Amino acid sequence: MNTETKSNFEAVVFDLDGTLLNTLDDLAASMNRVLESHQFPSHPVGSYLHFIGDGARMLAQRALPEDQRNESNIRKLHHAFEQDYRDNWGVATKLYPGIAEMLDHLIKRGMKLTILSNKPHEFTLTTAGHFLANWNFQCVFGQREGVPKKPDPAGILEISQELSIPPQNMLYLGDSGVDMKTARAAGCHAIGVTWGFRSQEELLENGAENLIETPNELFPLIDSLQA
């Protein structure tokens, strides 16, 4: 790595679903219930790896049969999904292995922790508050009215302003191409995590500067970037 790109990192921005939390089973179960209740075909859980990542409305659109993706159906499924998920977000969701230890270690290093998700803001706050309450996250933002969703860098730039830390002094960890595009657009260092929902190829094609396969690989990477 070039010396020009080395920096003193003071904060980490995390994606939520597929990065900190394995939410796949609960998201898939909620959407499948909604699809079936509206007489649409459901999907295997694995299909949701490709549906998730661009917000609940896009999840509803992708889950519908292609010839049924009209505005009325999308709106109807989106609303019904949010109703169902509100009651079922914590059935199977859990932290990925090694996340708790990684967060502990980051705090010991004095780094600030934040979350930026395309999940609706209400659900981002609820799930983070339940599963991540042991750690102090300075900012937790989901998809909010009037704020462009990822890959627009607006959320990261807002976090940067809140923390008074420039984006170049922030790491961004995410599991999707959308995350990598967001990080690069904002000027953060983009780290792709391979334990989540999307492939290494997608991460690299969309600008990942590094890949890590387990949470504990983050620390030698940080040390090498700051050496």
Image (cartoon, grey):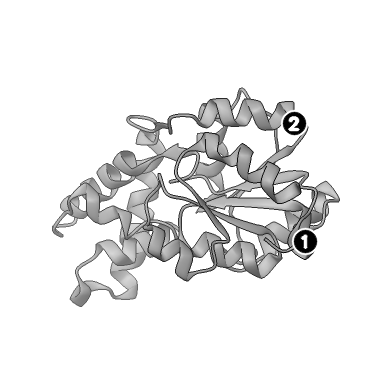
- Which comes before the other along the chain, label 2 or label 1? 1
The image shows residue 162, relative to residue 20, as above or below, that is below
Circle 2: element type: loop
Residue 225 disc label: none
Residue 214 vs residue 33: left or right?
Answer: right
Residue 3 disc label: 1
Residue at 46% across, 70% down: 205
Name the spot of residue 147 as percent of width and height, x first: 64, 63
Q: Badge 2, how many Cα within 10 Å: few under 14, some, many 20+?
A: few
Say which of 159 and 185 sits in front: 185
Residue at 68% across, 32% down: 106
Residue 109 vs residue 117: left or right?
Answer: right
The type of residue carrying mark 1 is Thr
- In the orientation shown, which residue stands out farthest toward the right? 164
Name the spot of residue 206 as percent of width and height, x first: 50, 69
Residue 109 disc label: 2
| 2 vs 1, front mark | 1
Name the spot of residue 27 as percent of width and height, x first: 33, 45
Residue 169 vs residue 86: left or right?
Answer: right
- In the orientation shown, which residue stands out farthest toward the top? 134
- Residue 131 visible to an observer of this rendering: yes
The type of residue carrying mark 2 is Arg
Q: Badge 1, how many Cα within 10 Å: few under 14, some, many 20+?
A: few
Distance from disc 2 to disc 1, alpha carbons, whole Å, reads 22 Å
